[in-house]
Every structure is written in C-alpha cells, then in structure tokens.
Image: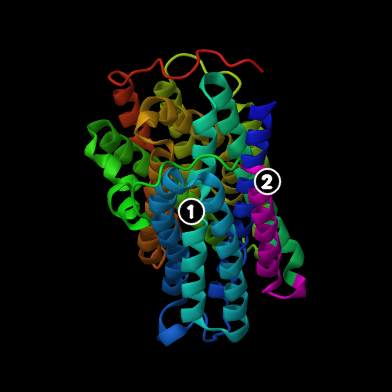
Amino acid sequence: MQSALLTAAACLVAFFSTVGAALPYPILPPLFAADAANSLNHFLGLPPKLLFGVALAINPLGLLIGSTLLGPLSDRYGRRPVLLITALGAATGHAITAISLLSQSYPLFIVARFATGLMEGNASVARAMLADQLEGAVRVRAFSLLNGALYMGWLAGPLLAGLTLHWGVTTPFWVAVVALLVTAGVAWFAVPRRGATALTSSWWQVVQHQNALKLLKHPQLRTLLAVQLAYTCGVTAFYEFYPLWLVEVSHFDAQGIAWTTAGLCAVMTTASVFAGRAVHGNPLKQASRFAVLSAVCVAAVGLGNPAVGLAAIVLFGLPNAWYNAVMPAWCAERFGHLGQGAVMGLLSTIFCLANILMASLGSVLTLMDTRLILLLGAGLSAWAAWRILRWSHNAPSAVVSAAISP
C-alpha cells in the first residue's frame, strides 16, 4: 500500500508539472510562422524561424540547469521541499509568460520561459523519490507509471491549449498556473517529509560539488552520457520540429497540432502502462531495439508524405515509451549507490542538453528545410541503438528483475 501511495504521489506531481511545460508547443509554431509581423515574431528584424529556435532552446536551457542541480539538492534537503518550491516557481514563470505575450515582449517571453524551465527541472526529484523507496520489479513498474503520467501531461497540455485558445493566446498559460498550484498542494500533502540528509554542507557546496555532472568522472556514466545524449537528440529533434513540419507540409493550425500531439501522447500513455510488465533478459539489448524503432519513426516523418508522416508521429509513442521504462530503471539499479537524485538528475540534464542542441541546430537547418533536422535526429538515435547494443556485451545485465508480473 505504501509503495502504491508513493507512486501515485510522484505521478500526480509529474503530471501537473508536465501539463504546464507542454502548453506552448502547439501555440508557438503558428505565432512565429504567421505572415503578420509583430514585435514578438520580428524582434530586432531577425528571421521568425531563428526567433522560434531560440524560444524553443531557452526553456530547455533552464531545464538543463535545474535538472543538474535540483536532484542533488533534493538529496541534501529532501524531496518534498524542493518539489513544493519548484512548483510554485513554475506557476510564477507561466504567469509572466502570459504577460509577455500580451505585451508582445520577446525579451520578457525569453526570460519567463527560462525561469519556468529552471523550476520544471524537477522530474528527476520525482524519479529519485521512487528510486529511494522501491526496488526491483516494483521500481520498474513505478517508473513505467511515472512515464505514463508524464505522457498524460503532454497529452493534456496541448489539448488544453487547443481547446482554450479561442479565449485568447494567454489563457493556456493561466491554466498552467492553476495546474502548478495544484502540484504544490500535492507536494504539500502527499509527498513524505523524510528524505533530507544530515546538514553537513551548505546549499552552495552541494551545487559546486554534488551536482549531477560530477558523476561523469565514472567511465560508465560517460558512456551513458554519449548514448543517452544521442538517443534524446533524436527524440527532441522530433518533439521540437514535427509541429513545424505539420504547419509547413500539412498546413495544420494550433488545434490540428494539438490533436496530433494528443494522439501521440495517448499512444505513449497506453504503452507506458504496460511497459514495465515484462522485462526479460538484458535491459540494454531491449533499449537498443526500442531506440532503433524510434529512429525509424523519426526518419519516416522526415522522408514520408503527409499521411505517412502523420502515422509515424503517432506510432513513435510506442518504442519511446518502452525505452523510457527500461533505461531509467537500469540506471537506478546500476548507479543508485552514487545518489538517486544525482543519477536521475543526470538523465534529465542529458535530455535538456539535447533540447538545446537540437533547437539550436534546427533554427539553422530549418532555414533550408525542416526535414533536415528530423533526419539528423533519426541518424543520431540509430547510432545510439548501435552503441547501446555494443555496451550491453560489457555492462552488467542482471540489474532488473527478469520478469515483472502484471
């Protein structure tokens, strides 16, 4: 019963946090692809696609910094206070984002998106909370459910954006404020108070010496950085630029993007519910197979016609959900002795770094052809699949339960 309550609390926190992060994705492409010039999409006379790329990259930059620091800080001060503070901070960031859109202030919009990302780097804290208390099959199952909650947030966020835009472009962000205030309430009432270590060092010492990047002194974690960064570059190239592909190729508006994203997230959510039920053999070999299938889906978007690309966007949710159930659970078992908060923070940091890299590259490549960034992402994920397969022959494989009961 205790494990079920803990999992439910982590899933609720993850869900409400992700709702706020997912809201802008169907909103931004039409704003920056619009023919009508304004001070938001023509700031300093720069190309709208370049401004769009910066707007995509700045939130993950905040996530990168937050993910690097929040996990270790929660190791030091406890999961509950960190989750509470970051939820309230993200709510404030979304409120400022709404104000920046009303005033058409691109600099304020960028600052607000950065601050929001900084606070929303708390997914590693929710994962670490589960990794602290659960083991083996129960842990893998909990991670798969947590992934399901995250995907449900990606579904609910774009849907809310599409359904509320007719009340004004700022309405979805005010909805995000409410959702994150609910998150703060969940953190206050449901997350256990225990979890802080003895106060032997200051928060600044934690930031300097116990951040997630310090783990990279271990050779196997440097290998993890390489393969996970390559795979997530493919994933983030897909996430960030398939909405622009839909606008350019299929002439979708914000509501069309929202419904497509809802289909994708529904598939990922459904798949994640079952992803932790049957893990057999070497988990790294399984992760390699799922990475190959993800790469195929991304390549199909870049190479396919509108119908093929649309189908590939939705089907991408299947292999990606399975990969994200297997890989974090393996990392928790293999490297948990180094601090679950730091390990989960490293995974989140890698994801954020991939967002920044692909948003930056994409802002240049899309000036030529949006499909180029999608094909680059597919190639990187395919390389990651090959490298993970090689790694599986050397890394310990008996790290998760051989079979997980339904």
Contact flag, marks 1 and 2 (Cβ < 8 Å)? no
**Residue 169 x/y as whole percent:** 67, 74
Can residue 192 be seen by looking at this rendering? yes
Amino acid type for the residue under numbered disc 2: Gly
Q: Could you tell me which residue is drawn at 38 percent across and 43 percent down?
A: 346
Marks 1, 2: nearer the viewer: 1
Q: Is residue 190 left or right of residue 339?
A: right
Q: Magenta region, mostly helix, strand or loop?
A: helix
Asked whether residue 222 is drawn in magenta, I would say: no
Quadrant containing the C terminus in the rendered view:
top right
Asked whether residue 185 is drawn in magenta, I would say: yes
Q: Is residue 69 left or right of residue 391?
A: right
Can residue 354 be seen by looking at this rendering? no
**Residue pointed to by mark 1:** 121
Mark 2 crowd level (few <14, some 14–19, many ≥20, 10 Å Cα): some
Q: Could you tell me which residue is drawn at 45 percent across and 23 percent down?
A: 286
Quadrant containing the N terminus in the rendered view:
top right
**Residue pointed to by mark 2:** 263
User: Residue 144 has which mark?
Assistant: none
Q: Nearer the viewer, residue 376 or 104?
A: 104
**Residue 277 x/y as whole percent:** 61, 21
Q: Could you tell me which residue is drawn at 63 percent across and 61 percent down?
A: 23
Earlier residue among tags 1 and 2: 1
Mark 1 crowd level (few <14, some 14–19, many ≥20, 10 Å Cα): many
Q: Is residue 307 left or right of residue 125?
A: right
Which span of residues is magenta-colored? 166-191
Q: Could you tell me which residue is drawn at 61 percent across and 65 percent down?
A: 91
**Residue 362 x/y as whole percent:** 40, 61
Amino acid type for the residue under numbered disc 1: Gly
